[in-house]
Image (cartoon, grey):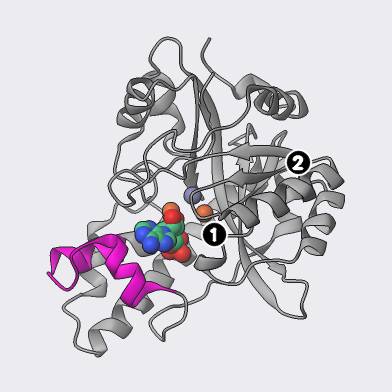
Amino acid sequence: MRIDLHCHSTASDGTDTPAELVAAAHRAGLDALAITDHDTTAGWAEAAAALPPGLRLVRGAELTCVSPDGRGGWCTIHLLAYLFDPQAEAVVAEHARTRAERRTRLHTMATRMAADGYPVDADTLLGDLPADVPAGRPHLAQALVRAGVVESVDQAFAELLHGRNHYHVPSHKTLAVDAIDMTKAAGGVTVLAHGFAHRRGPTVSAEVIGDMAAAGLDGVEVDHPDHDPEARARLRALADRHDLIVTGSSDYHGTNKTVRLGAETTDPAMLAELVSRASGAGLLVGS
Ligand code: AMP
Ligand code: FE
Ligand code: FE
Ligand code: ZN
């Protein structure tokens, strides 16, 4: 059994349509795949409708949240939410709010770059994105590639779009513990995404992960391309201590990233445990 529980489609900042994503998962020999677009469930129906035989689809989303970092400051964290009711009022409102904020934020980032002479136009960038698609830095990165400023999305992030220069606009996001509550109330389960991915920026302390576990977090993504062996070992130990489910996932974004589908995988027993904790388990589709 090969299971990949973190993937993006064109419903957010991936480059495969949801139908292409499930087809690619089938070709990659996966048995189960989660679709986890940022702040939207818009890809679920297309992915489910196109599901090849033998592939199971775990419906989910990735939420950008904030949390105390455990050192007196705050940091951004990503929370994977699975098998929740997509029509729950709080979920619909939170996704809509975040998507709106994403547009304003990306507009500001593009405006700042244009003011410095980069050939990007904020209105065109946002105008070309379908209204419901969660705008993200990868969209700005693609615009920079098209304009010939950089050669790849990766280069755009490394040189211009990382969180440490003045183009970057942090977002005012929901508290992680509130997102955990919201997801549970909607019948779903939550997993902390790439919790110790240091190269992405500041990460939370082990104590904070313990606090999240106490607040109802169900699992931690241990095997992720951005985790070095030490990060994986520390997260695995934390999962042991706090009785958290351990997952492994590629965080596939199509050609926006170099990682392949199924590059990291989840143990079938862990997926079974995740599903057993979700009252929205009926949202798992496929054989
Ligand atoms: P945003 O949601 O606007 O903050 O943008 C973050 C998104 O950019 C995440 O989904 C990441 O997967 C993606 N990302 C971060 N770093 C890179 C990178 N070096 N290359 C490609 N995509 C990246
Ligand atoms: Fe992304
Ligand atoms: Fe993420
Ligand atoms: Zn992701």
Which residue shows up at 43% across the image and 27% down it?
Answer: 45
* Secondary structure mainly formed by the magenta segment: helix
What residue is shown at x 47% (from left), y 76% (from top)? 163
Q: Residue at position x 82%, y 50% from top?
A: 213
Residue 136 in sight: no
Residue 161 magenta: yes
User: Which residue is tagged 1?
Assistant: 97
Identify which residue, 238 or 45, lies in the foreground: 238
| 111, 218: nearer the viewer | 218
Q: Secondary structure at mark 2?
A: loop
Residue 242, image x and y in percent? 85, 46
Q: Is residue 231 left or right of residue 19?
A: right
Mark 1 surroundings: few (<14), some (14-19) or many (≥20) residues within 10 A = few
Task: Specify the quadrant of the image occupied by residue 87.
Answer: top right
**Front-most of residues 225 and 14:** 225
Mark 1 Cβ inside 8 Å of ligand 1 = no
What residue span does the magenta drawing correspond to? 139-162
The quadrant holding residue 159 is bottom left
Instruction: Give percent across and percent down for residue 150.
Output: 19, 70
Could you tell me which residue is drawn at 43 percent across and 78 percent down? 168
| Residue position marked by numbered label 2 in the rendering | 218
Q: Is residue 156 above or below residue 253?
A: below
> Could you say where residue 157 lies in the image, as x and y percent from the top left?
35, 68
- Marks 1/2: CA–CA distance: 25 Å
Q: Amino acid at mark 2?
A: Asp
Q: Residue most toward the bottom?
A: 116
